[in-house]
């Protein structure tokens, strides 16, 4: 048995791992690389598998773009085997991929029109909306806890990952030479006590684990502090008459922030200022959330659903749909809150708002999620960087920048330690989805406590089991 990472190897984006068992080939996720635009574009455009025809199935952990975002390209290049995922992930993937196709079409149109003299090539988008729509016919939904056949000799089971709605850890049972072997994949492991969704499940006994390490050497703030940190920056900015810009992933983070804003407003702990969710994608994703109550935790029922209240809609909140509505926000005076995608500021409407508002000292930019290396979001939260480039123009960071890491949907070092140390029968850990300064200390802790082999592979490296 072999495992080969084709992405998220000593980096955070582009998750895609291959399991080889005899002549069987299984992919775990197939996500977009993010970061330096030209470098990411080159990595996204090609696959380094030997042949797409040899892939028997793809098993998907969740619907974030760095895990699902290249499946339409896979389909465009001829892949027609099944994609297995939870039912909520299937519904979310359709929305996310259609939006990705749209953004890529529009970005290519913009670059070809305005940046013809730059190094950016106008070779057409990676895939279009039609490709995203077409690829959904190979998606197959499964329930949490249900064993299903991936291909001959390989079955799998989804377990709650606690990361976003529909997100799953995966357990594989593989028959090799007449012997049953089990390996696990953490996907993106979440945290206990996050609002809306259930906490992560425990991983059952496995001999090998492919494990994320995004925050392998970082302790998050207590999730209970997030709401109050958000409250503080809103009150400060409102007193200045400014705008609070929140770059947020339209999937999960937007819903979490709206949830907390709803709680704060119900308690009259924030002023009555307009809250604009400037993301058609967020609106569509929120509709999917309401279709999948099987993923919710007890707090969601007790506080909202049990009282027939919509947690994502209240008097201050407005969801925009049209470009005209979005543009009108530029001339609208504060105070107000504008939440828009994408979370790493690499795409979507948030870039336009940042371009218009980042040089106004009355405003605030609130980062509420992970910012991958080299992304615009990482440059905005880095206090050593004073100027940022947005749409090929340079702007000074005059707005107040606040990073609330308590909202992170990823397990921190304590969560990861607890998760891995409790797995029975573990012989090897393969660390992925992390930068080296986070992975290395995590690896040392695993070796010290478990006394087992830990691998931090490079892209394309073959790991023998």
Image (tube, rainbow, N blue to C red):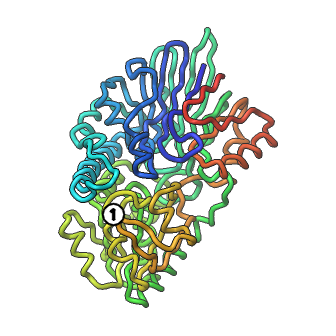
Q: Which residue lies most toward the top here?
A: 178
Q: Residue placed at 46% from the left, 52% from the top? A: 35
Left or right of 424, for residue 182: left
Residue 355 percent location from the top left of the image:
34, 71
Q: Residue placed at 60% from the left, 13% from the top? A: 176
Give the camera-side residue of 216 and 426. Answer: 216
Per the image, label 1 sits on a secondary structure element best described as loop
Would you name the residue on which mark 1 appears? Answer: 391
Q: Residue placed at 40% from the left, 48% from the top? A: 38
Report whether residue 243 is seen: yes
**Quarter containing the N terminus:** top right
Residue 120 percent location from the top left of the image:
33, 50
Left or right of 180, for residue 282: left
Check the image and report above or below for 387 versus 18.
Answer: below
Report whether residue 306 is seen: no
Give the camera-side residue of 292 and 11. Answer: 11
**Label 1 crowd bin: few (<14), some (14–19), many (20+), radius 10 Å:** few
Q: Residue placed at 31% from the left, 28% from the top? A: 77
Check the image and report above or below for 179 versus 126.
Answer: above
Residue 281 percent location from the top left of the image:
30, 56
Give the camera-side residue of 197 and 345. Answer: 345
Left or right of 219, for residue 127: left
**Quarter containing the C terminus:** top right
Check the image and report above or below for 422 versus 199.
Answer: above
Check the image and report above or below for 52 versus 413.
Answer: above
């Amino acid at each position: 048995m072999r495992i080969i990472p084709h992405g998220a190897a000593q980096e955070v984006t582009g998750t895609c791992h291959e399991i080889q068992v005899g002549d069987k080939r299984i992919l775990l996720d197939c996500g977009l690389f993010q970061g330096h635009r030209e470098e990411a574009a080159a990595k996204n455009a090609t696959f380094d598998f030997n042949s797409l025809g040899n892939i028997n199935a793809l098993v998907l952990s969740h619907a974030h773009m760095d895990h699902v975002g290249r499946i339409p390209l896979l389909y465009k290049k001829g892949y027609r085997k099944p994609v297995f995922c939870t039912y909520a992930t299937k519904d979310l993937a359709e929305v996310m991929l259609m939006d990705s196709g749209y953004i890529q079409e529009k970005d290519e149109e913009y670059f070809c029109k305005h940046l013809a003299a730059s190094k950016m090539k106008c070779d057409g988008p990676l895939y279009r909306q039609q490709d995203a729509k077409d690829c959904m016919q190979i998606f197959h939904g499964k329930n949490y806890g249900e064993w299903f056949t991936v291909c001959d000799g390989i079955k799998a089971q989804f377990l709650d990952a606690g990361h976003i709605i529909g997100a799953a850890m995966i357990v594989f049972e593989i028959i090799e030479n007449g012997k049953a072997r089990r390996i696990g994949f953490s996907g993106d492991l979440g945290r206990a006590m996050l609002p809306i969704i259930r906490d992560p499940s425990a991983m059952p006994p496995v001999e090998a684990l492919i494990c994320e390490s995004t925050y392998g050497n970082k302790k998050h703030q207590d999730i209970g502090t997030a709401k109050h940190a958000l409250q503080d920056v809103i009150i400060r900015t409102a007193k200045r008459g400014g705008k609070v810009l929140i770059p947020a992933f339209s999937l999960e983070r937007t819903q979490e922030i709206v949830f907390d804003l709803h709680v704060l407003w119900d308690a009259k702990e924030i002023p009555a200022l307009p809250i604009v969710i400037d993301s058609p994608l967020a609106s569509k994703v929120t509709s999917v959330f309401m279709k999948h109550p099987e993923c919710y935790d007890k707090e969601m029922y007790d506080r909202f659903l049990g009282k027939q209240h919509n947690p994502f809609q209240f008097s201050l909140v407005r969801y925009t749909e049209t470009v005209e509505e979005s543009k009108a926000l530029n001339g609208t005076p504060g105070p107000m809150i504008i939440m828009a995608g994408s979370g790493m500021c690499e795409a979507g409407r948030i870039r336009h708002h940042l371009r218009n508002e980042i040089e106004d000292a009355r405003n605030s930019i609130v980062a509420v999620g992970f910012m991958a290396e080299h992304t615009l979001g990482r440059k905005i939260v880095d206090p050593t960087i004073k100027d940022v480039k947005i749409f090929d123009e340079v702007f000074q960071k005059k707005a107040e920048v606040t990073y609330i890491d308590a909202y992170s949907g990823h397990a921190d070092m304590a969560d990861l330690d607890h998760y891995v140390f409790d797995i029975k029968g573990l012989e090897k850990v393969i660390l992925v989805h992390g930068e080296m300064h986070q992975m290395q200390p995590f690896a040392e802790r695993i070796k010290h406590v478990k006394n087992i082999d830990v691998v931090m592979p490079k892209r394309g490296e073959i790991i023998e089991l």
